[in-house]
Image: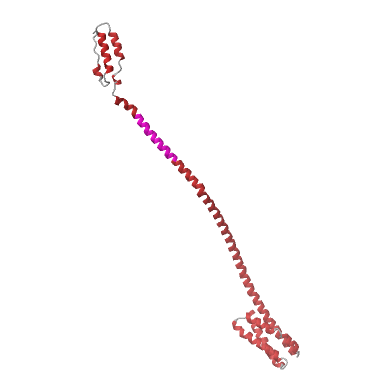
């Protein structure tokens, strides 16, 4: 076997061997003899470097690791997408709930508050009117009391005028005019009896009895009738002074 055949055999054998062979064991020994030295050098240059002959498991690792990383990345991307979708749905639900439930309630509350404010303003207006009416009622009560006092004064003065007119008529021995003058005196004294104080009611009752006595005395005893009319005039004048002086 010549050198060329030997070199070819040695070059072919590493291709059929396992790729686990260490680079140091693959050294080629050639004899620097003969005319094929240049060809052998060229073939040695074509032999792949020892780094290319690696175990299959080690060759798979660089390919598997990116796959595992890409799977984890895809998982987290999906998880983030789901989380973002849930956040968007939750936000939409909150907005829809606001417009469906909260917003109408706020509008209703605003309307109710406006009605309450209007009612409060109406109440304040009514209270102001009531205060004015109460003030007017106080004035009315005061005026009523003043009117009652005036009417009471008028009744006393009218009764006093009746008695004085009867006295003048009897002084002229005009019994008819005297009776006519006393015709409404008892009614005036009865009306006066309702307005005077309790302490003066007996006095007014005595005046009514005396008027009836005078009417019975005019035809029978003018002198007695004159005396009773004098007593009536004195009592009426005293009553008028006690109330209106």
Q: Residue shown at 69%/89% (left/top)?
A: 214
- What residue is shown at x 59% (from left), y 83% (from top)? 199
Look at the image and tell me in which quarter the N terminus lies. Answer: top left
Front residue of this view, candidates 200 and 220: 220
Q: Quadrant of residue 60?
A: top left
Query: Is residue 198 in view?
Result: yes
User: Percent position (x, y) of residue 118?
Assistant: 58, 57
Q: Is residue 32 left or right of residue 165?
A: left
The outermost residue toward the bottom is 220
* Residue 18 higher or lower than 2, as above or below: below
Quadrant where the C terminus is found in the figure: bottom right
Q: Main secondary structure of the magenta part?
A: helix
Q: At which x and y percent is residue 84?
A: 43, 39
Q: Residue furthest top?
A: 35
- Determine if the magenta segment contains residue 158: no
What residue range appears in magenta?
Answer: 65-85
Identify which residue is drawn at 62% across, 68% down: 136
């Amino acid at each position: 076997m010549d050198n060329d055949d030997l070199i070819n055999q040695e070059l072919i054998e590493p291709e059929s061997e396992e790729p686990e062979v260490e680079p140091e064991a693959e050294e080629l020994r050639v004899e620097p003899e003969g005319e094929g030295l240049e060809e052998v050098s060229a073939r040695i240059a074509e032999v792949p470097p020892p780094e290319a002959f690696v175990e299959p498991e080690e060759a798979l690792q660089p390919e598997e690791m990116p796959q595992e990383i890409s799977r984890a990345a895809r998982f987290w991307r999906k998880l983030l997408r789901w989380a973002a979708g849930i956040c968007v749905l939750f936000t939409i639900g909150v907005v829809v709930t606001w417009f469906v439930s909260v917003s109408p309630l706020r509008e209703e509350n605003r309307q109710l508050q406006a009605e309450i404010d209007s009612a409060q303003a109406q109440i304040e207006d009514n209270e102001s009117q009531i205060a004015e009416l109460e003030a007017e009622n106080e004035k009315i009560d005061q005026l009523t009391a003043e009117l009652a006092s005036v009417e009471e004064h008028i009744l006393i003065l009218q009764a006093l005028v009746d008695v004085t007119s009867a006295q003048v008529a009897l002084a002229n021995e005009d019994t008819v005019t005297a009776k006519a003058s006393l015709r409404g005196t008892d009614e005036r004294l009865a009306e006066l009896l309702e307005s005077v104080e309790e302490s003066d009611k007996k006095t007014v009752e005595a005046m009514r009895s005396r008027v009836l006595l005078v009417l019975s005395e005019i035809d029978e005893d003018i002198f007695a009738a004159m005396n009773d009319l004098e007593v009536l005039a004195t009592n009426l004048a005293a009553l008028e002074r006690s109330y209106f002086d």
